[in-house]
Image: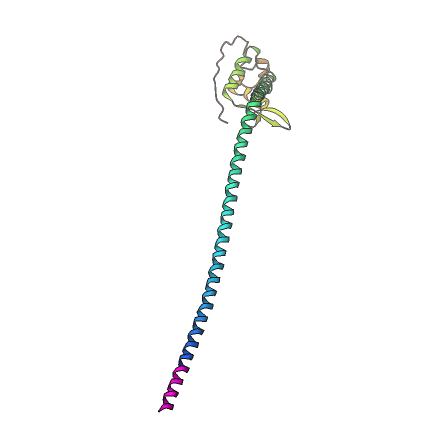
């Protein structure tokens, strides 16, 4: 009986030892796993902090860029204001000079060109101002560059050619001297304007 008790006690001790060993192994495994989890968590936290730092750096860079652009824009506005203040008078004078030269060009090219064209078709001298006024008011005369030379034009036709055609029309014939208008049904004028009927027309072309 005593031997049986001893054997039972030995079995219990052996079982307790196995259980203790299993528990120790399990605890050790949990400790190792916990260590791994802690390491992983630390790694993720480090990555998160690194990402936050990069985002903050990018945001700061964008802010600095925006501020630099704003400063550059302000500097440009200040520069323009300074230039306008310093050179406004010169710019105004230059603009006035350009406008004056343009007016002079209009006078020379269109004014003289129209007079020369009317003389060329033998418009009566006393009626010259009336013919010029009529053509100026009823047609749009522009200045175009033809072979590098400013030329008076009417709807794509040279002014001289246009006046030549006009002088042969029913309206133009009234302004042409008898000696210069020999077309069929031509009616000359003696300079007094008697029997003269002027009709103001507007060319649509």
The residue sitting at the top extreme is: 192
Residue 42 appears in the figure: yes
Q: Residue at x 50, y 20 (%)?
A: 138
Asked whether residue 72 is drawn in magenta, I would say no
User: Was residue 5 drawn as part of the magenta stretch in this picture?
Assistant: yes
Q: Position of residue 185 (x, y in %)?
A: 53, 18
* Along the line of sight, the residue nearer the viewer: 143 or 28: 28
Left or right of 109 on screen, residue 36: left
In the rendered view, tell whether residue 51 sits above or below residue 121: below
Residue sitting at the far bottom: 1
Relative height, residue 183 to residue 146 (above, below): above
In-front residue for pair 91/201? 91
Q: Please indicate whether residue 145 sits to the left or right of residue 61 in the image.
A: right
Q: Give me the residue at 53% from left, 21% from top.
A: 169
Q: How many marks?
A: 0
Report which quarter residue 167 is drawn in: top right
Instruction: State whether residue 64 is above or below residue 44.
Output: above
Residue found 51% across the figure and 36% down from its top: 70
The overriding secondary structure of the stretch rendered in magenta is helix
Q: Position of residue 39 (x, y in %)?
A: 48, 62
**Rendered location of residue 90, percent (x, y):** 58, 21
Q: Nearer the viewer, residue 198 or 177?
A: 198
Quarter of the image for residue 154 reads: top right
Q: The magenta stretch spans which residues?
A: 1-13
């Amino acid at each position: 009986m005593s031997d049986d008790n001893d054997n039972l006690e030995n079995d219990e001790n052996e079982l307790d030892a196995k259980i203790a060993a299993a528990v120790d192994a399990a605890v050790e495994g949990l400790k190792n796993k916990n260590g791994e989890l802690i390491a992983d968590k630390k790694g993720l936290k480090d990555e998160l902090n690194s990402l936050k730092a990069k985002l903050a750096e990018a945001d700061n860079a964008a802010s600095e860029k925006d501020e630099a652009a704003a400063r550059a824009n302000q500097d440009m506005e200040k520069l323009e204001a300074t230039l306008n203040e310093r050179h406004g008078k010169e710019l105004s004078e230059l603009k006035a000079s350009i406008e004056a030269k343009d007016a002079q060009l209009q006078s020379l090219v269109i004014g003289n060109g129209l007079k020369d064209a009317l003389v060329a078709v033998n418009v009566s001298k006393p009626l010259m101002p009336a013919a010029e006024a009529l053509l100026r008011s009823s047609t749009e005369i522009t200045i175009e560059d033809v072979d590098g030379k400013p030329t008076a034009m009417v709807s794509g036709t040279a002014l001289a050619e246009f006046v030549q055609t006009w002088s042969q029309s029913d309206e133009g014939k009234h302004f042409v001297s008898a000696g210069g208008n020999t077309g069929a049904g031509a009616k000359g004028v003696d300079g007094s304007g008697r029997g003269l009927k002027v009709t103001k027309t507007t060319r649509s072309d």
